[in-house]
Image (cartoon, rainbow, N blue to C red):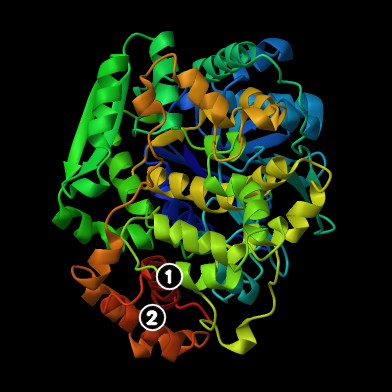
C-alpha cells in the first residue's frame, strides 16, 4: 500500500507540501516521490510500500507523456489488462498499466480495474485532475476545494481545515463512526466508493460521477451443491489474483467462517501458507485455540501470539490516536496487534473482511423476519420492560445486549429499525443545538434499492455505511500503521458480482446467516467449528473501564475536556460514567466512543 497527496493552488509551498506528504510515511516507508509542475501550481506526492515490481522503475509519481499518476492500492487483473494495451512498458508494475489504461480508455478504464485503489491522474491535455476509488472504497481518498484550488490526500491528517462538521458529529453520536461523503472536518469530503471525480484546473469546478453501482438478481439459485461449486471456483480465482506479490504473504486466521474459508482455499492453491492469530491471556475473549485447531486441520504454517493485559493497555492511547476521525469500535485494538504480529514475518496478508456484508453474516439480517413474529405477540410493553431489566453482561456480542437492541428497534419499520437499533443509549448526549441535522440518514440508501428484497436492501445499506465507514477504515488504518498491506478477496469484482446475484435464501434464512459460506466450509472443517456461535473480535473493555482503564477514561472525559467540546451534555456523560462504574448499566460501547470523540477534538484542536 501507499499514501498519496496532491495540491493545486496559486503557488505551491514545496516544503510545506513535502511535510504533509511525509505525514503519510507509515503508509509507504520504502521511498517517496514528488512531482511539481513547471508553473509551480500543482504538486503530487507519493509514499511507497513496495509490493509489485520493487525496482525504481515503478516509483511514483509516474509520468508518461502528458499524464502523471499517483496511486494507492493493487489492481489484480493488471497483467490481463497489460496484454490488451499493446504498449512498450517501462516497468512491470500495475501503476503503469493503470495509467496506460486511462490514456487509452479515459475514465471508462475504472470499470475495468479489479482490486482496491485510490488514484489521481493529472491529465495535462484536458487540464484536469482525475480522482477515483474502487467499488467499495477499500482504499481511502479525501479532498477539499480551496479558495483558489484543490487538495486531496489518503488521510485527513494532511488537511489544514480543523473545523468541526456538526452533521458528521451527530452521525458519529448515532453509529460511533463517520459514514457517507462528509467527514468530521467541515468542507473536507470522502470521494464516494465506485466514483471518479474530475477537477478542472481552468474553471476550478469539481464534477463527481458514479461508474459502478451494485445490481441484484437471483442468477445463482436452485441446487445448493451447484451454487456451492460456483462459489468455490469464484472465490478461489479471487484468492489466486490476491496472491500476486513480490514480497512474503500470509493469511489472517480467526476461528470465524470468513478467514477460515480464505485460509482453506489458499491452502488448495499453494502448499505453503502462513496463518496468523492473536490471542489473549484473558481466556473468555480468546479464539486462538479454535484458530489453532483450524490451522492444524488445514495444514497451515500457523503463527500465534498471546497478548498480556499490560502490553494491550499501554498501547490503547496510541491506537486510538491513529485514526484521523473519531472511531468508536474497540476491535481496532486487537486488529492493531494482529497486523503488528503479521508484519514481523510478511508484508501482505489476506483477510476475510467484506463477507458479512455480502453474504449476510449478522443477526440483524433476519430481524425483519423476527420483527414480524414479535409484533404479533401480546403484552409487548411488559416484554420490553422485562428485557430492559435484565442485568448487563460482558462481551461485545452478549445475549442481553443483542436482545435489548432488538426490542428497542422492533417498534419501527425495518428500514428505520436498521438505523435505530444501534442508538439505544445515546439520547441526550448532544446538546439540542447539535441535534436534528440527521434523523433517518439511512433512508437515502434504502431509497436506491427500495424495489429489492429486504435482505438485499439491508446488505446494500451496510455495504455503503458500516462496511466502508467503519470496518474497511479500521483495517486500512491498523494495517498501514504497521506498513502491512491487507487484501480482501471477498471484495474482488467476481465475488461481489456472485454475492449480489445470489438468491437471498442462500444467504439468510430465518435465524441462519451466511448459509452458502457455511455449506462450502463444511467441505474443509467439522460442523462443530463451522456452526459455532459468532464471536466479536474484542477484549473485556467493560471491566477494564471500571478498573485498569478507569483513570484513562476519567482523564479523557474530565469536566474540562467535555466543556472544551461544547456539544456534550456534561451531566449525561457523568451519569453514564457513574452508572457504568457502579455496574448499574453497561455503557462500555458508548464510553469508548465518547473517549475517542473527546480525545480527538482536544488533541487535534478542532474548532467547534
- Identified at 33% across, 56% down, the residue is 395
SS for dot 1: helix
* Element at label 2: helix
Picture coordinates of residue 149 (x, y %)?
71, 62
Q: Is residue 151 above or below residue 113?
A: below
- Dividing the picture into quadrants, the one containing residue 238 is top right
Residue named by callout 1 = 590
The one of 173 and 414 positioned closer to us in this rendering:
414
Compared across the picture, whether 555 is left or right of 20 comes to left
User: Is residue 350 or residue 426 the one in the foreground?
Assistant: 426
Q: Mark 1 and mark 2 in contact (Cβ < 8 Å)?
A: yes
- The 10 Å Cα crowd at callout 1, few under 14, some 14 to 19, many 20 or more, is many
**Of 124 and 314, the residue lying toward us:** 314
Q: Is residue 205 visible?
A: yes
Asked whether residue 8 is in view, the answer is: no
- Image location (x, y in percent) of residue 405: 52, 62
On the image, the x and y values in percent for residue 225 come to: 60, 12
- In this view of the protein, which residue sits in the foreground, 503 or 241? 503
Q: Position of residue 244 (x, y in %)?
A: 48, 18
> Along the horizontal axis of the image, is 219 left or right of 603?
right
Q: What residue is shown with label 2?
A: 576
Residue occupying the point 72% across, 60% down: 413
User: In this rendering, is residue 220 above or below 206?
Assistant: above
Q: Which quarter of the figure has residue 66?
A: top right
Instruction: Please tell me in which quadrant of the rendered image residue 115 appears.
Output: top right
Distance between mark 2 and mark 1 Cα atoms? 9 Å
Image quarter in which the C terminus is found: bottom right
Q: Residue furthest front?
A: 378
Q: Is residue 38 left or right of residue 405?
A: right
Amino acid at each position: 500500500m501507499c499514501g498519496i497527496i496532491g495540491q493545486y493552488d496559486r503557488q505551491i509551498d514545496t516544503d510545506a507540501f513535502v511535510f504533509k506528504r511525509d505525514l503519510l510515511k507509515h503508509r509507504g516507508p520504502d521511498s517517496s516521490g514528488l512531482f511539481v509542475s513547471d508553473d509551480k501550481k500543482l504538486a503530487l506526492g507519493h509514499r511507497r510500500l513496495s509490493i509489485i515490481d520493487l525496482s525504481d522503475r515503478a516509483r511514483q509519481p509516474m509520468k508518461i507523456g502528458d499524464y502523471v499518476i499517483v496511486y494507492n492500492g493493487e489492481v489484480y487483473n493488471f497483467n490481463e489488462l497489460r496484454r490488451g494495451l499493446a504498449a512498450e512498458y517501462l516497468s512491470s508494475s500495475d501503476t503503469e498499466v493503470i495509467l496506460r489504461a486511462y490514456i487509452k480508455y479515459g475514465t471508462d478504464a475504472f470499470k475495468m480495474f479489479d482490486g482496491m485503489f485510490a488514484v489521481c491522474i493529472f491529465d495535462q491535455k484536458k487540464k484536469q485532475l482525475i480522482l477515483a476509488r474502487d467499488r467499495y472504497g477499500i482504499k481511502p481518498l479525501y479532498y477539499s476545494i480551496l479558495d483558489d484550488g484543490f487538495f486531496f490526500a489518503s488521510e485527513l491528517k494532511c488537511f489544514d481545515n480543523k473545523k468541526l462538521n456538526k452533521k458528521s458529529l451527530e452521525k458519529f453520536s448515532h453509529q460511533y463512526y463517520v459514514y457517507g461523503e462528509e467527514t468530521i472536518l467541515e468542507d473536507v469530503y470522502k470521494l464516494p466508493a465506485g466514483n471518479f471525480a474530475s477537477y478542472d484546473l481552468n474553471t476550478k469546478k469539481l464534477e463527481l460521477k458514479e461508474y459502478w453501482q451494485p445490481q441484484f438478481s437471483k442468477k445463482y439459485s436452485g441446487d445448493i451443491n451447484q451454487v456451492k461449486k460456483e462459489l468455490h471456483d469464484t472465490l478461489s480465482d479471487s484468492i489466486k489474483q490476491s496472491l500476486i506479490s513480490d514480497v512474503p504473504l500470509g493469511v489472517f486466521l480467526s476461528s470465524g467462517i470468513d478467514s477460515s474459508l480464505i485460509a482453506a482455499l489458499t491452502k488448495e492453491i499453494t502448499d505453503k501458507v502462513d496463518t496468523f492469530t492473536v490471542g489473549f491471556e484473558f481466556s473468555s475473549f480468546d479464539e486462538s485455540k479454535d484458530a489453532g485447531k483450524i490451522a492444524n486441520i488445514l495444514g497451515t504454517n500457523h503463527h500465534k501470539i498471546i497478548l498480556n493485559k499490560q502490553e494491550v493497555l499501554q498501547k490503547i492511547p496510541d491506537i486510538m490516536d491513529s485514526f484521523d476521525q473519531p472511531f468508536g469500535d474497540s476491535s481496532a485494538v486487537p486488529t492493531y496487534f494482529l497486523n503488528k504480529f503479521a508484519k514481523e514475518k510478511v508484508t501482505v496478508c489476506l483477510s476475510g473482511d467484506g463477507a458479512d456484508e455480502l453474504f449476510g453474516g449478522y443477526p440483524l439480517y433476519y430481524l425483519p423476519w423476527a420483527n414480524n413474529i414479535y409484533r404479533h405477540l401480546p403484552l409487548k410493553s411488559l416484554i420490553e420492560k422485562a428485557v430492559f431489566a435484565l442485568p448487563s453482561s460482558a462481551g461485545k456480542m452478549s445475549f442481553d445486549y443483542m436482545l435489548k437492541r432488538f426490542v428497542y428497534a422492533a417498534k419501527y419499520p425495518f428500514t428505520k429499525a436498521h438505523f435505530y437499533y444501534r442508538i439505544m443509549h445515546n439520547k441526550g448526549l448532544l446538546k439540542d443545538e447539535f441535534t436534528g441535522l440527521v434523523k433517518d440518514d439511512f433512508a437515502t440508501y434504502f431509497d436506491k434499492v427500495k424495489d429489492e428484497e429486504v435482505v438485499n436492501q439491508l446488505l446494500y445499506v451496510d455495504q455503503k455505511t458500516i462496511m466502508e465507514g467503519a470496518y474497511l477504515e479500521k483495517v486500512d488504518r491498523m494495517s498501514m500503521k504497521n506498513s502491512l498491506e491487507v487484501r480482501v478477496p471477498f471484495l474482488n469484482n467476481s465475488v461481489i458480482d456472485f454475492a449480489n446475484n445470489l438468491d437471498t435464501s442462500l444467504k439468510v434464512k430465518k435465524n441462519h446467516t451466511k448459509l452458502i459460506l457455511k455449506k462450502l466450509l463444511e467441505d474443509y472443517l467439522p460442523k462443530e467449528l463451522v456452526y459455532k456461535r459468532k464471536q466479536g473480535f474484542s477484549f473485556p473493555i467493560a471491566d477494564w473501564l471500571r478498573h485498569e482503564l478507569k483513570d484513562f477514561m476519567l482523564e479523557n472525559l474530565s469536566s474540562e475536556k467535555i466543556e472544551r467540546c461544547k456539544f456534550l451534555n456534561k451531566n449525561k456523560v457523568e451519569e453514564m460514567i457513574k452508572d457504568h462504574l457502579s455496574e448499574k448499566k453497561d455503557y462500555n460501547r458508548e464510553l469508548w466512543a465518547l473517549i475517542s470523540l473527546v480525545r480527538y477534538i482536544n488533541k487535534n484542536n478542532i474548532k467547534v
